[in-house]
């Protein structure tokens, strides 16, 4: 279907009485007396949605690993599993899936008992595009993207995440948000400011344990 | 002999009051504009410095003053600085002939709240107004840069076109009042029991258009046109020198020209006028302060209206602006003079 | 797939002996020797009705020539013109479109470094030729002003040739790029290269500028590269007589990142990330166009689950509104109506919120995947979208109240930048720009992909092709997008919650398709597939020799071709119109430069 867009020319009445201006002015004055919608940033902050693709983290072993995938991969690579440490099995799939593989620096270490454990896991976020392919590729739900988005730093070194930082972000995440349901966003006052005029009503979150990836 | 000293003292007090109003208010109008603009755009505007950002103009001023004083290479330093003076002085001088209220008595002296009630007041206003074009032309030329040059030429073109239109537009009220003295024009409106806007709507529209054009407000802000010319003739200015131009153009000039509009069309300090009924004063409870309140109210209303327009409309193109001036505004103003001359004798009675 | 059939073109065989017509599964190509190229193109344009110029570029066959197996595969499939010629290194292709009969054709020829110019037939070809000269070093005989399109004039290499390394040739020391932290040069964890590829100096840029434009009038105004009116980093040169523009040229390339080169070294899914960064205002639409192109190439379009198709359609329509809102805001801003900018951004922010909640990112989204989408919709997504589209038309009519019938708006837009239909073909413009001229060229209707054949919508077209018509077209397009989203939401609500959102390939097809895209192999073949971006037709020409990476990807950037009409439109107009026309063409630099 083709729709022709035609607009009638201005009438003389509209021209002489400035009706076109008055129409516009009526809109702006109505907005002037409506509530403001902005978030006063450094003082107020929005909570990013759970799916937000921010800084990376390593989830740690806490008994909630995706089974049986985790055990299979652990067995396959002969990994020493330690409670409270990264779930990484050094499969390098993240590096393989990454469009800029140079940003990963991953190394495993052999322990005395013959098992392996991840020893180096550096991510240079200066090269990162935050696309999330590595997260998709991770077979054991270890690498993930958190809601940390204020990522400015004073030196380039700070933009390199090492294993400890990744684990820290992961532990923090598992404590804070891991158990949230997979909703588009959580209701907070800041978001309500923008959305109040749409009177959006989200359905009640279904009480659910862990969100399945 | 004594009266000379008293006159001098009164004049100095008046000058201080007016300068205080012009510059202090000018700076604070930036805050008003930012707030108005913000709320029209659904933002709160400045909120951090002071209560609702009330100290923001001072913070801005401090910042601008402490900035490095830049000067374009191969520019002309004398003209570059002269432009600032030429912009600021004529704009503030106009306040000299703006009557703020009726005559009153203090310690037995009769004081007119106007700096100098010269009998060619309106002529002075437009004479000083046309000086502004020099400031802009000089600023553009002395900067030795392409964008300022184009911006200043645009602005000069507009001012020259609209000088003509605005002069013919005010001719209507002047014919009705029969005088050029600003104080007397208001007095005549009060005596004739009539705001001139009721008989001069066309002149008022032409005047408002010219006001917007001369002060570079939307829809005529093409000398700025940040999307085309970045900021036009102020590109090469920095710090407070940069801040001064908008201060003069957008606030002080708008203030003076709105005050003149109030004097010419809206009866100065007189209360609300309804045609065929006369003056109605809902602010009578203010007693002797009521005229000042009215004057302030009218100027504020006009200023806010201009802001409202500014933050609603898009802008014209340079050739369209001059076209409107010569092809629509000027003939309208001339026609208005002819009609006014015909009806004037009826109003003089 | 709307490709010309062999029988349509068979009479050409008699008129041009030596040409060859190949009808493949994904394309129809005419192979023509170089000396008959211009005559053939002329006949195609004037007699066969292939009037719209879509794209022209070159494939460097160096690697194929050296690898016997690839050569055999390609020539067996008929992808190489004149396979008996084992010397000519380049294969040039021209993609033409017949809008009336909705047919496409590829014209291919082989060359060793020179080609005749098609400048007289299509102006758009002139810009495409500049790009080829820049990237491959092809000399065009008879080209009016053969200058580099993106790189500076003194740059010595041709980066898209296969012998140019991906990471460039590091030959310049740039100490300022290296950070030293308290005496520590930050080596170790992640090393920064001390040497850098060539960087233009001021002299280089001056030479580039001088080559572009010979001063004829009073002032040459450098409008950009950094200027609030250019919507990015474009460098315009205006030769001014007073305020009138006597001649104008554009210098592109400030944002050139070599996306096409990168594509040759990325897996099919991973290239998504770069499509985000081409047209960064409408990343989802670019994603979708790429994903659809790859799916068509793999031949798995039929197994994409319904849910994924509808989600992709819905999301890319949201993105279209988002993109048009940015256009509306900046357009109004350029014409002085600042308030509209913030109103538009208010609604845009809501779309951003929705996109962020569903995909996790606001700008560079990478949400679709070859075979479906990355994740299912989260809880509450449809409710939020419904709440948004319920209110959005009201806001839209609010803005229209301010602008559409405003006398200033009318005077600034009417009769400015008029593009006639004939010119639209000549300059190869697409999208709202061609629709503003009255040609209902919309890929969503002409070559529907994803859920577009199943939803109802109108294609708005203008009358005269001036800026005002393009404005009306875009505004109406937003309304139509709302309509599409409504239908998609309705459909998605009906689908069961656990319906699949990612394709499962039947066992017999032997395609390894995973959500992360590791190991996805494409068959030997070529395809030109396009999607309707908010800015026009975004086309991908992919040539694959089998394997996980494409051999050559040519992107047809809508902004690039839309922009090529700009110098023509700006002739004899004033600077104030420069912003109007530029904003109504609405180029995105990430895409023109790639």
Image: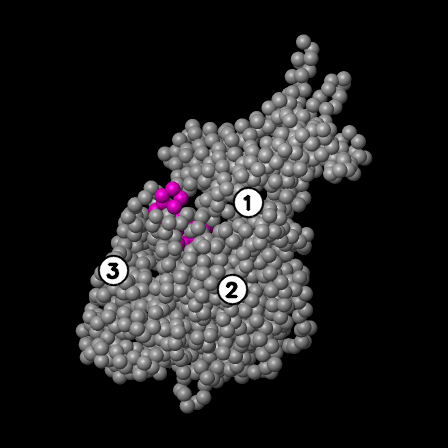
Residue occupied by mark 1: B218
Q: Write the residue at 39% across / 76% down.
A: C101
Residue B329: give x, y in percent of width and height: 54, 40
Q: How many residues crowd around disc 3 within 10 Å: few (fewer than 14), some, or many (20 or more)?
A: some
Chain of the residue displaying label 2: A
Residue occupied by mark 3: C143
Marking on residue A5: 2
Q: Residue furthest front?
A: B342
3D distance between C-alphas at marks 3 and 2: 39 Å
State the extent of the magenta-drawn residues as a range.
Answer: C223-244
Question: Which quarter of the figure is the C terminus of chain C placed in?
Answer: bottom left
- Queried whether the magenta region covers residue B312, the answer comes back as no
3D distance between C-alphas at marks 1 and 3: 45 Å
Residue C91: give x, y in percent of width and height: 25, 72
Task: Please name which of the two marks, 3 or 2, marks the residue nearer to the observer.
Answer: 2
Q: Residue furthest right?
A: B285
Is label 1 in contact with label 3 (beta carbons under 8 Å)?
no
Marks 1 and 3 share the same chain: no
User: Label 1's element?
Assistant: loop
Q: Residue furthest top?
A: B1
User: Label 2's element?
Assistant: loop
């Amino acid at each position: 279907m083709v729709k022709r867009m035609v607009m009638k020319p201005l009438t003389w009445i509209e021209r002489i009485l400035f009706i076109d201006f008055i129409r516009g002015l009526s809109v702006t004055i109505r907005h002037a007396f409506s509530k403001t919608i902005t978030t006063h940033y450094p003082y107020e902050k929005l909570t990013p949605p759970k799916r937000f693709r921010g800084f990376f983290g390593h989830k740690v072993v806490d008994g909630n690993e995706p089974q049986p995938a985790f055990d299979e991969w652990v067995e396959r690579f002969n990994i020493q599993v330690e409670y409270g440490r990264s779930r990484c099995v050094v499969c390098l799939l993240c590096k393989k899936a990454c469009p800029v593989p140079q940003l990963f620096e991953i190394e495993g270490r052999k322990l005395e008992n013959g098992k392996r454990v991840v020893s180096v896991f550096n991510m240079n976020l200066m090269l990162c595009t935050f696309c999330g392919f590595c997260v998709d590729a991770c077979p054991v739900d270890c690498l993930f993207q958190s809601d940390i988005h204020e990522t400015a730093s004073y030196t380039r070194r700070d933009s390199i995440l090492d294993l400890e930082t990744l684990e820290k972000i992961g532990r923090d995440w598992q404590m804070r948000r891991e158990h949230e349901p997979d909703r588009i966003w959580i209701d907070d006052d800041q978001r309500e400011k923008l959305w109040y005029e749409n009177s959006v009503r989200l359905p009640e979150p279904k009480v659910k344990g862990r969100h399945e990836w | 002999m004594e009266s000379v000293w008293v006159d001098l003292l009164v004049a100095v007090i008046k000058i201080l009051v007016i300068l205080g109003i012009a510059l202090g208010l000018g700076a604070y109008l930036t805050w008003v504009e930012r707030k108005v603009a913000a709320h029209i755009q659904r933002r709160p505007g400045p909120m951090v410095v002071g209560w609702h950002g009330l100290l923001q103009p001072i913070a801005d001023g401090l910042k601008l003053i402490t900035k490095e004083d830049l000067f374009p290479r191969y520019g002309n330093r004398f003209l570059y600085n002269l432009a600032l003076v030429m912009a600021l002085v004529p704009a503030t001088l106009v306040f000299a002939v703006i009557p703020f209220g009726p005559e009153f008595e203090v310690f037995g002296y009769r004081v007119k709240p106007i700096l100098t009630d010269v009998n060619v007041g309106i002529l002075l206003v437009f004479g000083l107004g046309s000086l502004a074009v020099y400031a802009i032309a000089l600023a553009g030329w002395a900067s030795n840069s392409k964008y300022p040059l184009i911006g200043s030429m645009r602005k000069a073109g507009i001012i020259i076109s609209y000088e003509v239109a605005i002069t013919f537009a005010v001719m209507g009220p002047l014919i009705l009042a029969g005088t050029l003295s600003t104080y007397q024009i208001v007095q005549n409106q009060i005596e004739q029991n009539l705001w001139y806007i009721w008989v001069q709507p066309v002149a008022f529209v032409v005047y408002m258009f010219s006001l917007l054009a001369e002060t570079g407000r939307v829809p005529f802000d093409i000398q700025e046109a940040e999307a085309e010319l970045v900021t036009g003739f102020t590109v090469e200015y920095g710090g407070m020198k940069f801040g001064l131009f908008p201060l003069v153009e957008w606030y002080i000039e708008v203030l003076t020209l709105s005050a003149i509009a109030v004097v010419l069309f809206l009866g100065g300090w007189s209360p609300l006028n309804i045609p065929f009924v006369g003056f109605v004063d809902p602010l009578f409870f203010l007693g002797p302060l009521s005229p000042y309140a009215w004057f302030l109210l009218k100027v504020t209303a006009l200023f806010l209206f201009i802001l409202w327009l500014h933050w609603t409309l898009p802008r014209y193109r340079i050739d369209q602006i001059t076209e409107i001036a010569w092809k629509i505004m000027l003939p309208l103003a001339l026609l208005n003079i002819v009609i006014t001359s015909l009806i004037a004798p009826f109003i003089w009675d | 797939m709307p490709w010309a059939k062999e029988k349509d073109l068979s009479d050409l065989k008699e008129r041009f002996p030596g040409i060859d017509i190949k009808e493949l599964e994904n394309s129809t190509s005419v192979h023509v020797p170089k000396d008959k190229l211009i005559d053939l193109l002329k006949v195609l344009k004037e007699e066969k009705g292939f009037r719209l110029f879509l794209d022209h570029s070159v494939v460097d066959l160096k690697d194929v020539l050296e690898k016997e197996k690839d050569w055999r595969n390609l020539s067996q499939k008929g992808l190489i013109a004149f396979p008996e010629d084992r010397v000519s290194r380049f294969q040039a292709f021209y993609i033409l479109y017949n809008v009336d009969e909705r047919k496409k054709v590829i014209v291919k020829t082989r060359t060793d470094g020179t080609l005749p110019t098609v400048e007289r037939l299509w102006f758009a070809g002139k810009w495409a030729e500049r790009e080829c000269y820049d990237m491959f070093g092809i000399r065009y005989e008879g080209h009016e002003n053969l200058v580099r399109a993106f790189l500076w004039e003194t740059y010595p290499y041709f980066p898209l040739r296969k012998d140019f390394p991906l990471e460039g040739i590091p030959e310049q020391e740039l100490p300022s790029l290296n950070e030293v932290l308290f005496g520590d040069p930050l080596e170790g964890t992640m090393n920064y290269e001390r040497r850098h590829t060539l960087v233009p100096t001021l002299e280089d840029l001056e030479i580039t500028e001088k080559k572009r434009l010979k001063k004829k009038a009073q002032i040459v105004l450098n409008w950009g590269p950094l200027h609030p009116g250019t919507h990015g980093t474009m460098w315009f040169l205006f030769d001014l007589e007073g305020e009138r523009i006597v001649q104008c040229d554009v210098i592109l390339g400030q944002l050139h990142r070599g996306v096409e080169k990168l594509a040759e070294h990325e897996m099919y899914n991973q290239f998504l990330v770069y499509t985000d960064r081409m047209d960064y205002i409408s990343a989802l639409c670019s994603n979708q166009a790429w994903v659809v192109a790859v799916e068509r190439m793999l031949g798995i379009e039929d197994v994409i689950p319904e849910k994924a198709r509808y989600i992709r359609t819905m999301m890319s329509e949201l993105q279209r509104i988002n993109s048009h809102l940015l256009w509306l805001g900046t357009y109004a801003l350029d014409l002085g109506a600042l308030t509209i900018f913030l109103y538009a951004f208010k609604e845009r922010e809501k779309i951003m919120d929705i996109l962020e909640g569903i995909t996790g990112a606001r700008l560079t989204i990478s949400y679709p995947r070859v075979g479906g989408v990355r994740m299912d919709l989260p809880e509450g997504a449809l409710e939020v979208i419904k709440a948004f589209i319920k209110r959005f038309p009201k806001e839209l009519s609010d803005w229209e109240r301010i602008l559409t019938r405003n006398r200033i708006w009318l005077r600034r837009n009417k009769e400015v930048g008029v593009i006639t239909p004939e010119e639209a073909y000549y300059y190869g413009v697409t999208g709202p720009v061609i629709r503003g001229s009255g040609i209902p060229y919309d890929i969503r209707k002409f070559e529907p992909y994803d859920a577009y054949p199943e939803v109802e919508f109108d294609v708005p077209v203008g009358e005269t092709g001036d800026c005002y018509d393009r404005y009306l077209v875009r505004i109406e397009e937003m309304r139509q997008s709302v309509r599409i989203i409504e239908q998609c939401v309705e459909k998605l609500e009906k689908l069961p919650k656990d319906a699949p959102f990612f394709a499962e390939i039947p066992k017999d097809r032997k395609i390894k398709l995973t959500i992360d895209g590791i190991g996805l192999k494409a068959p030997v073949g070529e395809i030109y597939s396009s999607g309707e971006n908010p800015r026009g037709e975004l086309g991908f020409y992919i040539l694959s020799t089998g394997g996980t990476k494409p051999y050559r990807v040519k992107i047809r950037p809508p902004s690039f071709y839309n922009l090529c009409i700009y110098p023509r439109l700006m002739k004899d107009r004033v600077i104030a119109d420069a912003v109007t026309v530029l904003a109504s063409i609405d180029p995105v630099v990430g895409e023109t430069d790639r």
